[in-house]
Image (cartoon, rainbow, N blue to C red):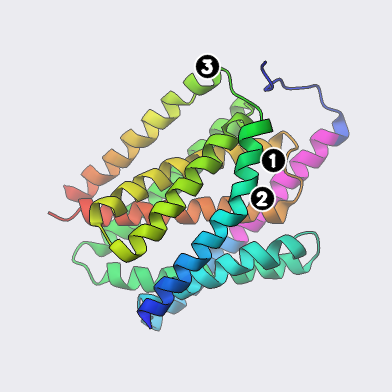
Amino acid sequence: MELFLKIGLAAVLLMLVWRLYPAAKEQMKNGPKGSSDDWKGLILPAVLLIGFVFLLIMMVRS
Amino acid sequence: MNHNITMPRSQEQVLATNKVLKNTYMLLSATMLFSALMAVISIYLEMPPMVYMGAVIGSMLLGMFVLPRTANATSGIGVIFLITGLLGFGLGAILTRYLAMPNGPEIIGTAFAGTGIIFLSLSAYVLTSRRDFSFMGGFLFAGMITVVIAMVANIFLAIPALSLALSAAIILLMSGLILFDTSRIINGGETNYIMATYSLYLSIFNIFISLLQILGIMGDD
């Protein structure tokens, strides 16, 4: 039963990739491109997010 | 060329955007509550972990094939409640396992609070800065495809380190998606509140599940 569910889940996930691929291709080809400042602006939220997850891990471990 | 220029928008456009945002958050709150109720029922019934996989398969099929066809009709609301209810029921099966662990309730509480803080902070950041994050689209889609392919491999390989790395990648990607989706709503790129709710719900759900997994593995000595 579990193997069937695993195969089913893998099939549905591959179906998702097949559905996502054209949108991804379109976004990468014709989607808006960010300037270097746009990408730099994401560094702070990303660092804060990673720091926050580490804080949660420390809280659970303590 | 910089495409991320905010154009002056008419009052009607601003009102329409605010309506989509308000409806999205209202539907998101309702679906979250329904999902939590279904999770409680699932915990009460002590569902086995494989129910989670079944619920994910069912909700993904509904999300891919039924929701896009009903999102412009009233029936779309029923479909989104069906999807989120199924995911909540599946989540209950996972939570039952965590509750059996010695520090399980603490891990669940921390993951829940952490998910809430991440979602509220990222949403507040977009809503106050009014920045356009549409430039992240290509990166997020490519990242999602990579992660999904790695997830398929790990369903059969079951490598704990890969599972941990995938959870970390999912948290980063879903956080990016919250920025991207919220920015699309406030900039008029998403006008359907049912699809906007579905996307935000999935981001929150995936962050919660991934945090649960990271805290479950890392919190254990």
Position in image of residue B101 (x %, y %): 21, 68
Residue that appears at 12% across and 54% down = B221
Q: Is residue B38 left or right of residue A31?
A: left
Q: Could one spot residue A58 in this view of the protein?
A: yes
> Disc 3 marks which amino acid?
Ser
The stretch of residues the image draws in magenta is B13-30
Q: Is residue B134 left or right of residue B49?
A: right
Cβ atoms at labels 2 and 1 below 8 Å apart: yes
Tell me the residue at 59%/68% (across/down): B61
Measured in 3D between alpha carbons, the distance from the residue under mark 3 to the one under mark 1, in whole angstroms, is: 24 Å
- For the N terminus of chain B, give its image quadrant: top right
Q: Is residue B22 magenta?
A: yes
Same subunit: marks 2 and 3: no
Crowding near pointer 1: few (<14 within 10 Å), some, many (20+)? many
- The first of marks 2 and 1 along the sequence is 1
Disc marking residue A36 = 3
Chain letter of disc 2?
A: B
Q: Of residues A57 and B55, which is closer to you in this image?
A: B55
Residue carrying label 1: B185
Residue matched to label 2: B196
> Mark 3 or mark 1: which is in front?
3
Query: Residue A45 location in percent, x, y?
Result: 44, 29
Query: Quick one: label 3, few (<14), some, or many (20+) residues within 10 Å?
Result: few
Question: Are both tags, 3 and 1, on one chain?
Answer: no
Give the CA distance from mark 2 to mark 3.
28 Å
